[in-house]
Image (tube, rainbow, N blue to C red):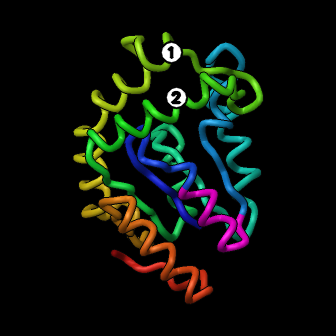
Amino acid sequence: RVVVLGVTGAGKTTMAAALAAMLGAVHIELDAIQWRENWTKAPLDEILAALAGATAAPRWVADGNYSSVRPALWPLADTVIWLDYSLWRCLWRVTVRTLRRVRRRELLWGVNRETIGNALLSKDGLPAWAVQTHGRYRREFEQLMRGDAYPQLRWVRLRSPRQARVWLGHLQATKKPDSIEES
């Protein structure tokens, strides 16, 4: 039961999907639960109901930073994977990812499409969000990692994509879900 955290563009969903496949676990993408058509947010009670259903599985990997669901999700988790990458790396990744999605006209969560305007150029766009939240999330996650609010959690802090690949490779080589250890 794993939660994957990181700033926009860090690769939370990619990591969570790979980890879920490796562990034979359900992948819970919090963005897919939250976002509705035309970028409207689902009501919190609906998000929590969907989350309760998904976390009923014996093994799951959730990705996302939503503090609103933390009280429902984190007490059930045993591990947090923190993709603590540099702001510049995340900005590069979110820009490349968005340009790819726009070019391919990818549908997100079956209901929304990114555009250059809403994703990259808007004051509420993904690069702006990454800049606004990078330092705040780093401080918040550091406090959570060092704090005692969720004492059952093991933390794995990965500071680069290379370190994440090595860690996943090690996990794959051991083929034991219980081998998730702090980095």
Q: Would you say the magenta stretch is mainly helix, strand or loop?
A: helix
| For residue 48, side relative to residue 135 (left or right) | right
Q: Left or right of 44: which side holds 130?
A: left
Residue at left offset 60%, top offset 86%:
176
In the image, residue 111 sits, relative to residue 75, either above or below, namely above
Find out whether residue 48 is within the magenta segment: no
Separation (CA) of disc 2 from disc 1: 8 Å
Question: Residue flagged by tag 1: what amino acid is it?
Answer: Ile
Q: How many marks?
A: 2
- In the image, 93 versus 20, the foreground residue is 93
- Relative height, residue 50 to residue 126 (above, below): below
Q: Determine which residue is flagged by label 1.
A: 116
Give coordinates of residue 167: x percent, y percent: 44, 74
Give above or below for 132 relative to 9.
above
Q: Quadrant of residue 26?
A: bottom right
Say whether residue 119 is visible. yes
Residue drawn 71% across and 18% down?
37
Given residues 86 and 23, the one toward you in this image is 86
Is any atom of residue 72 visible in this view? no
Label drawn at residue 150:
none
Magenta highlight on residue 16: yes
**Picture coordinates of residue 143 (x, y %)?**
24, 54
Residue at the location (49% across, 47% down)? 70
* Secondary element type, mark 2: helix
Q: Which residues are magenta?
A: 15-25
Give the residue pinned by disc 2: 98
Q: Amino acid at mark 2?
A: Thr
Q: Are marks 2 and 1 in contact (CB under 8 Å)?
A: yes
Tell me the element at label 1. Answer: helix
Q: Position of residue 153 (x, y in %)?
A: 43, 69
**Quarter of the view holding residue 87:** top left
Q: Mark 2: few, some, or many residues within 10 Å (few <14, many ≥20)?
A: many
